[in-house]
Amino acid sequence: MSKTYILAIDQGTTSSRAMLYNARLQVVGRGQFEFKQYFPANGFVEHDPEEIWQTTLQACRQALSDANVQAYEVAAIGITNQRETSVVWDRKTGKPIHRAIVWQDRRTAEKCRQLQQANHEPWVQKRTGLLLDPYFSATKVAWMLDHVKGARARAEAGELAFGTIDSFLLWRLTKGQVHATDATNASRTQLMNLSSRQWDSELCALFAVPMPMLPSIEDNAHHFGMADSSWFGAEIPIAAMIGDQQGALVGQACLEPGHIKSTYGTGCFALVNTGQEQVHSEHRLLTTLGYQLNGQPTYALEGSIFMAGAIVQWLRDKLGIIQTAAETERLAEGVPCDQSELLIPAFTGLGAPYWDPDARAAIFGMTRDTGKKQLAAAALRSVALQTRDLLQAMVEDGQTIETVKVDGGMTDNGWFMQALADITGYTVLRADTAEITARGTAFLAGLQVGLFKQLHDLQQLCRTKGTFTAEITSNERDKLYQRWLAAVAKVR
């Protein structure tokens, strides 16, 4: 029987998902399992790597079972993952030395401040495209080496391995045979030189991360090794790995300079393809790798905000005003754009373009009339307002934006989609599936094993499901945005 299926692992911040695709990139099977979030101290966010591994295995097996497909029918596995989240494990046993430190974690804010005060940021930004912030992996790794007894000496001796989640899953799937990462995930560690796309010894020295613990860096479509037959019943080639936001850039077929996508998952991440050019932002956006194929880089400019779907989770889990995310659409109906309530979702600081780890969340403008409806609308609008921050910074950095392709779980919410068009003023194109990230990595895996011939084949496989245009005036839009900027200033 011919191998025509692709298994895409999408390991996210709150759940591990797996999608089984056919050769036309249609989903034929799926699996998803949530896992626990750990908050051991203020600003600390952790995951259990063993739980990530087990939920990933479960999700893959469920996707295969769901489609009644056997492992020997699968041509390739592609992996996409939450970026920056860092794991350090023992090379002999494969056991992590500490819980994974998540991208949202702020424990190294003081270390980043010290490096800024020592005037290292311009040099780091020029070399990596990234700003000094706890968001990235480098300071997380150093923290583990300094806080787990004996870890630093063991790392220097080559006994410990570091990886982002893609690398950790690859290690487990190959039973410790392969320690590698892809160029997009490596570009988010703050240890990779963005021009050479290799680990940089001077960066490693600055952040005190021993180089023997680092994985090899490969293209996004690459033969990474074989998933051991014990996991799914037959060996399967692992043919692609890519960070989740770059996976969405590919999945949305943003393959030409100027094409932009914005993904709404736990956080919100907007990337614009800048082609072969590294655009260095004057407005505190990130220069990053979009994807790398056949050793050739395609760069992107990125705006990252930490709270998008996570705000809806907060409404559900902490305030208890909804039971499911979908309820926010019904609640927000009828709440006007000039509502007095304004939510600044700086629960874990502010991302781009502010990069303020010490900012904290606040709700302004509450009245006796404020209730569930107003809070739901303010929460959804805050994501649209943060998106305007990102798009405005991109325009000021010289990018021309005509339409914005969007994806992610929040895009199922039609009220939010309309708010996004109203507040940004751009035409918003909703993808035909929320699982764009998985589609991107599935395509790259299929490209590697010959199911697809060239990158631009993807354009024929991408469709939209809804177009949204602004229904408020530019004057109303600008007035709301000025209120937002004034409120943000108060929490900084």
Image (cartoon, grey):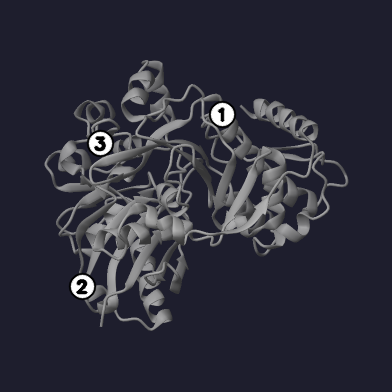
Is label 3 or label 1 in front? 1
Pointer 2: what residue? 235
Counting from the top left corner in percent of width and height, residue 4 is at: 31, 74
Pointer 1: what residue? 395
> Of all residues shown, which one is farthest toward the right?
368
Which sits earlier in the primary sequence, circle 2 or circle 3?
3
Tell me if 297 is positioned left or right of 412 in this view.
Answer: left
Residue 388 in sight in this render? yes
Density class for disc 1 (Cα within 10 Å; few <14, some 14-19, many ≥20) is few
Which sits earlier in the primary sequence, circle 1 or circle 2?
2
Q: What residue type is labelled 1?
A: Val
Which quarter of the figure is the C terminus placed in?
top right
Between 455 and 262, which is closer to the camera in this rendering? 455
Q: Distance between the residues labelled 1 and 2?
A: 47 Å
Pointer 3: what residue? 197
Is label 1 or label 2 in front? 1
Q: Which amino acid does label 2 sit on?
A: Glu
Which sits earlier in the primary sequence, circle 3 or circle 1?
3
Density class for disc 3 (Cα within 10 Å; few <14, some 14-19, many ≥20) is many
Counting from the top left corner in percent of width and height, residue 91 is at: 16, 53
Density class for disc 2 (Cα within 10 Å; few <14, some 14-19, many ≥20) is many
